[in-house]
Amino acid sequence: MRTVLCRALGASWGRVGFRCTGVAAACLLAVIATAATAGLLLGTVPEMTLAGKPIAEACRGCAPSPKDIIAARLGGSSLPTRTVRDAGWRNLGPDLGAVWAPITIDPGGSGIIYTGSIGGGVRKSTDNGVTWSAVNDGLAARAIYSLAMDAAGPEVVYAGTFSLIEAEPSGVYKSSDGGASWTFLAEGPGIPFCITADPRTSGRIFVGGLGGEILRTLDGGDTWKEVREPEVFGRPVTSIVIDPNNPSRIYASGTTGSIRSTNGGWHWTAMSDLPQVVWALAIDPANTHVLYAATNDNGIWRSSNSGATWRPLGTIAHATFGIMVDPTAHTLYASTSGGVLQSSDGGASWQQTSLSPQTVYTTSIGPGGDLYAGTSTGIALSLNLGNTWTDPDPTLGDSKAFGYAITVDPNAGKNLWVTTLGSTILTSQNRGTTWGAFDEGYSGHEPRKINIDPTNSNRIYLGSFIGGGLFKSVDGGATWERRVFGGADVYVWVPVIDPVSPNIVYAGTNGHGLFKSTNYGDTWADVENVPPVVQGITVDPRDHDVVFIATNEGILRSSDEGATWTSVLDLGPGWSITIVGGNSPVVYATLKRLGVFRSSDGGFTWEEINNGVTNTTMGRAAPVIIASNDAKVLYVGSEGGGGVFKSIDAGDSWFSVNLGLDDTSVFGLARDPKVADRLYASGPHGIWTTTTGGQ
């Protein structure tokens, strides 16, 4: 007894079927008949002959065919990896190691450099960037928002991390051995957006949080003091700088304005001349009374009197995220959505370096004049002041993008759009085979959800976090324009288009409630009497007067296009609402931590339907998906480790479909509009697809 399929078909025998002609077709029938007679489904079959010859000899010419399942039944335990992955989920990448955190270079000239990436954690070079290695032992969260080197030297480093996964605590981590190991400083801010170390005093560290708070430690993170109270979550302190000649003078910027302190951070006053959103501040080391500010949509500003007054410099046509002063060449470098720009005349005029058009978040310069840039796709190095650039750490790109939400073009299922945590906006025009970054004109740091006009794929809307707001594209995502409403830094969770009247667009925000546009998103009006946080919106395609919103207080329903609202499910924060098509009154909803609910009367009353859902922490962009060919077949995603669940009885029961899905924390879930079981899932380790519903 031994297997004969491998001998008969060669190395490809484990494919799920055969295509045979002539005697080979008879071979296949004989194999099937023998296996059926023996009652064998897996393992081995007896040695057989056909026309007096061993089957291995008689069956030459057989070729595998995916249309049959006989090989899987006969040798399922030995199926090649690719066949197994094709049967379930397979990863589409994309490889993307965005660098937000300041590239931290030892000013003493030791050659030690640290970079922090979104997804790849902290990386280190000891030879001025020639070689790199990951230094992540003990670092639970691998999305690095900020880095700082202690005045004691390059062995003491602080990293500010952010994670949307509860098992990976966000906060400040400290290494005292050059990154070989990290310790979590539990008393620090929950989400540290920026970290600054006093260049003259070891252990004196300031941290700016995502809620607008500022904390200070004088003992290297053992104890902390809050020197500025939080404001509103999602309006972070984006930059803190300390005057190297006078450490009592400290400046801080954010998305709600900029402040300064002259007594070490105990008291703060506003720098009111500046625009509201300021991404970064920089001090001229040659004259520390001179400061520069990168102001997102309003270019670079300058103060010559320690921040008392400010004036704008030359025009920059891109969003500006960072500013750096070269202390030796008296050159300014601006990190923008269009690459690195430089000015040699104090900011009166700006020239594009060759690093374009990709988004650059931060720029640093080493003691020898080497210029480093942290970009939406990795790190770049210039040895000639920006004339040419190279990628000094190509393996950083092996980190998978953290896929937040995924959208399939309703008019062309091969076209995918993905928003990423801390990175950029990605698109694929071939179902994920290749990807490209499409963020020209996008001036936010955290894209959220995308919605495409079903009548015109060139018209796309994007919600954004952290100083972003709502963006619109009319050229298929090639370029984006910001639409300001409800405050310049409004956090937009989700834009949704009315499927009946596409000129009507809704936008759900974090802290500002719901907005509505009747002219394709060009102007907006506040929708009254809704909770401040709106995370999901659904318009009934059969009657666009009926609108559902998922809020921080539960699910609300309107029967008059949002003029009035009724709370219909008030068990806690909701993520999404899905309406069954046709004449069905069935509606599904996902709640943030309570799983899936169903209404059988158009959304007025609800029942919990979590039978088989092993983790009820739902994906924030993973609503209930209905198969195109059967309304009883449903899919839903879980962030809490459950992955993707499927139901074949309209939600009465669920089972997991995670074959090949390496990371089971699913943030986004979408389906091809034309193919019932072609799904896409997004999460911390990239984008995944299945053509079999995950089974």
Image: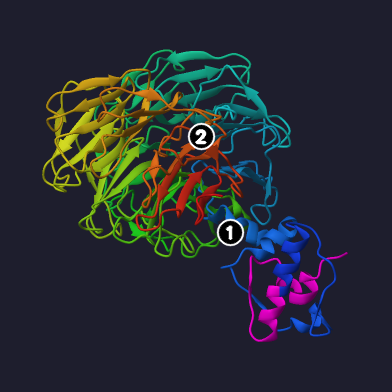
Name the amino acid type tagged 1.
Asp
Relative to 613, say whether 369 is above or below. Answer: below
- Quadrant location of the N terminus? bottom right
**Was residue 385 drawn as part of the magenta stretch in this picture?**
no
Percent x, y of residue 692: 51, 54
- The residue that disc 1 covers is 86
Q: CA distance from mark 2 to mark 1?
A: 23 Å
Which contiguous range is marked in magenta? 1-29
For image coordinates 32% across by 46% down, the residue present is: 450
For image coordinates 54% across by 29% down, the residue present is: 615
Percent x, y of residue 59: 74, 81
Q: Residues within 10 Å of mark 2 (few under 14, many from 20)?
A: many
Percent x, y of residue 486: 20, 30
Element at badge 1? helix
Nearer to me, 344 or 414 = 414
For image coordinates 69% across by 41% down, the residue present is: 135
* Number of the front mark, 2 or 1: 1
Task: Say how the picture is coloured.
Answer: rainbow
In the displayed structure image, the side of residue 479 where residue 565 appears, left or right:
left
Quick one: label 2 or label 1, which is nearer the N terminus?
A: 1
In the displayed structure image, the side of residue 610 where residue 261 appears, left or right:
left
Name the amino acid type tagged 2.
Glu
Nearer to me, 690 or 460 = 690
Nearer to me, 684 or 124 = 684
Q: Quadrant of residue 555?
A: top left
- The residue that disc 2 covers is 639
Relative to 545, say whether 343 is above or below. Answer: below
Q: Residues within 10 Å of mark 1 (few under 14, many from 20)?
A: some
Q: Is residue 62 visible?
A: yes
Q: Residue furthest front?
A: 37
